[in-house]
Image: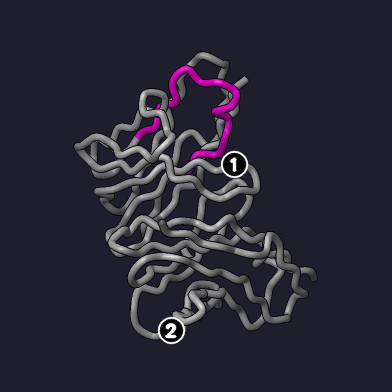
């Protein structure tokens, strides 16, 4: 149980375009989902906390107008990278909170902006 | 502010030998501690957690971790390493009313045949 999926797993886009990443909890309802960014050989950086039906809470230094997060249902959260630039290239990981201090992570999305 | 330190970027161990991946933390109040494993180009998989109770926590795939309050440590251990254990391991800690954990930088475990 506690499976989280992400789509797409890998995306290449041109600079200036927008990309949407979906995060779904397949067998549980996630009131809270988290979005992380991971650089090569580095730790996870929390970008934002997404709560179903309300605005996301962004970490300091994360541009909310660039990284749009929507948590429209208890099983789906989306991250849209708007006007992507090469420096946005990264591995993006979402997780769902089961409410027992455990987070269950998606497989990640590799974004490459050319 | 809470922080997590994983002092070793890489740990090398021979298959069959015991392994230890170190983690120390700094949080206010009682800590919530976690270990996750990440395989290449994949998300993180939960291994084990300490919230309260017995200081020795047993988790998935034969891993265990010991909570040491005086040393503020939560080292990950396994009695006999497998080549398939080779992966990136993350320690995470939360506390002080925040249940959102902070992650360490990760330790690459390499198990040699």
**Looking at the picture, how far across and down is residue A24, in whole percent?**
36, 42
Residue at (46%, 23%) from the top-left corner? A19
Q: Is residue B90 above or below residue A53?
A: below
Q: Which mark is residue B108?
A: none
Q: Is residue B91 above or below residue A76?
A: below
Q: Indicate left or right for A18 with A38 as reference.
A: left
- Helix, strand, or loop for circle 2? loop
Q: Quadrant of the N terminus of chain A?
A: bottom left
**Farthest residue toward the right?**
B113
Q: Is residue A22 above or below residue B71?
A: above
**Farthest residue toward the top?**
A16
Disc 1 residue crowd, few under 14, some 14–19, many 20+, Cα 10 Å: few
Label 2 sits on residue:
B55
Residue at (65%, 67%) from the top-left corner? B85
Q: Quadrant of the C terminus of chain A?
A: top right
Check if mark 2's residue and mark 1's residue have beta carbons within 8 Å: no
Reply yes or no: does residue A82 show up in magenta: yes
Reply yes or no: does residue A36 show up in magenta: no
Residue at (41%, 24%) from the top-left corner? A66
Distance of label 2 from label 1 (alpha carbons): 33 Å
**Looking at the picture, how far across and down is residue B19, in whole percent?**
67, 77
**Looking at the picture, how far across and down is residue B93, in whole percent?**
43, 63
Label 1 sits on residue:
A39
Which span is picked out in magenta?
A: A78-93
Q: Nearer the viewer, residue B93 or B80?
A: B93
**Looking at the picture, how far across and down is residue A56, in whole percent?**
29, 37
């Amino acid at each position: 149980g506690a499976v989280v999926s992400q789509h797409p797993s890998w995306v290449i886009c041109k600079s200036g375009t927008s990309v949407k990443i979906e995060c779904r909890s397949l067998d549980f309802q996630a009131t809270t989902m988290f979005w992380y960014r991971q650089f090569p050989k580095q730790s996870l950086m929390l970008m934002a906390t997404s709560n179903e039906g309300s605005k996301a809470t962004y970490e300091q230094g994360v541009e909310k107008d660039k990284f749009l997060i929507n948590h429209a249902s208890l099983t789906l959260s989306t991250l849209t990278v708007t006007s992507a630039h090469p420096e946005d290239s990264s591995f993006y990981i979402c997780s769902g909170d089961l409410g027992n201090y455990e987070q269950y992570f998606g497989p990640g999305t590799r974004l490459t902006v050319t | 502010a809470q922080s997590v330190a994983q002092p070793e970027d890489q740990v090398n161990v021979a298959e069959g030998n015991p392994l230890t991946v170190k983690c120390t933390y700094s949080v206010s109040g009682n800590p919530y501690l976690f270990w996750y494993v990440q395989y290449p180009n994949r998300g993180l998989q939960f291994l084990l957690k300490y919230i309260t109770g017995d200081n020795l926590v047993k988790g998935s795939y034969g891993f265990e971790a010991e909570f040491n309050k005086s040393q503020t440590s939560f080292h990950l251990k396994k009695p006999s390493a497998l080549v398939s254990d080779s992966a990136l391991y993350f320690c995470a800690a939360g506390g002080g009313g925040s249940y959102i954990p902070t992650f360490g930088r990760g330790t690459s475990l390499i198990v040699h045949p």
